[in-house]
Image (cartoon, helix red, strand yellow):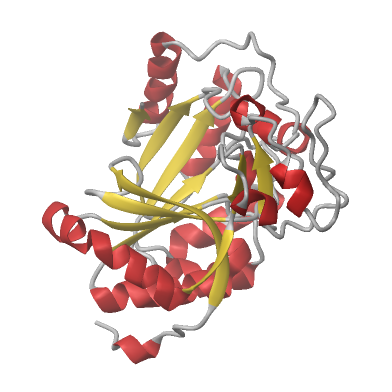
Amino acid sequence: MLREDKYNKNKEGTIFDIQRFSINDGPGIRTIVFLKGCPLKCKWCSNPESQSKDIQITFNKSSCINCGKCIDVCPQGAISLDGNNKIDRDKCDNCGLCVDNCYSNALVKIGRKIKVEELLQELKKDSVHFRRSGGGVTLSGGELLGQADFVAEILKGCKSMGWHTTLETTAFAKKEAVEKVIPLADLVLLDIKHTNNDIHINHIGVGNKIILENAKHISMISKELIIRVPVIPHFNCDNESINAIASFVKTLENVIRVDLLAYHNLGSSKYQNLEMKYEMDSDIAIPTDNIMNEFKEVFESFDMKCVIEG
């Protein structure tokens, strides 16, 4: 076990949420820390607030009581009640004065700066659940490798507490970040979304060459690895795509299983609050149980354990 002075307590990073009592992102009962910033722009992203690395202000029009207090306190003149209740994102500097003075909580600040020691003190509140359930801390995003120095110190701090650690990553990062962070974690959950570079660019905004290269490296330096495959209609929800992913995953080391995650649109309402466009068609159907079981059998045909996550 590391001594507590073996990590940088004052290293600072940006997070946007802490979610407790999770049972789907690593063993046991877990607390998930969501880090801000992601280079991928998946059309189906359920956490659009994770994409920007900056602190943001989100506005829920249905909660607004039109009191006008936000307009009075905004030093940038970035808010108007013209019927659309829009924030001028070019003027807004995310100072948060409007949030502090919003009586109805229609305005919410997404993201905050936090030091490693402050975060660890917050996580200590859940340590009894970690100990009793065999759980621990999961770091997610966004893409946590974009804050590699911060994440490395969190992991060292967690290890000093004796907590199990899990990372959720897209693997779209510099190799230096991968090497700094991955060996410090007990378990890595790695997304593989598609093996075709052109399709990857069209739906995600970046190519997959870096991801696939890093996936191979991560499989060699991680302690345990779970591959996660989101099953998305009109993207990879077909036998050709799933077979290609299975064939690639078969080349990796230390993979203990593959998780299939069916598409859902539960995060679509967040886009309007951030004045972002949700790119998925509203009539896209969730993959059926039969389809998901068929894809599960594909991975099993490659002699890999595969489970369908809820």
Q: Quadrant of the N terminus?
A: bottom left
Residue 160 point in image, percent of width and height: 29, 79
- Along the line of sight, the residue nearer the viewer: 235 or 256: 235
The residue depicted at 39 percent of the width and 24 percent of the height is 296
The answer to whether residue 173 is above or below residue 287 is below
Mark yes or no: residue 53 visible.
Answer: no
Q: Is residue 62 left or right of residue 259?
A: right
Q: Is residue 258 left or right of residue 147?
A: left
Q: Split into 4 quadrants, where in the image is the C terminus?
A: top left
Residue found at the far left of this picture: 132
Residue at x 41%, y 30% (from the top left corner)? 299
Residue at screen point 53% across, 26% down? 242
275, 37: nearer the viewer: 275
Figure quadrant of residue 6: bottom left
Q: Residue at x 53, y 80 (%)?
A: 11
Give the percent coordinates (x, y) of residue 207.
Answer: 74, 45
Residue 234 in percent (x, y) is at 66, 18
Determine the image quadrant of residue 188. bottom left
Numbered disc total = 0
Can residue 227 be seen here?
A: yes
The front one of 165 and 101 is 101
Q: Nearer the viewer, residue 220 or 62?
A: 62
Instruction: Indicate whether 152 appears above or below 129.
Output: below
Q: Is residue 94 above or below residue 276?
A: below
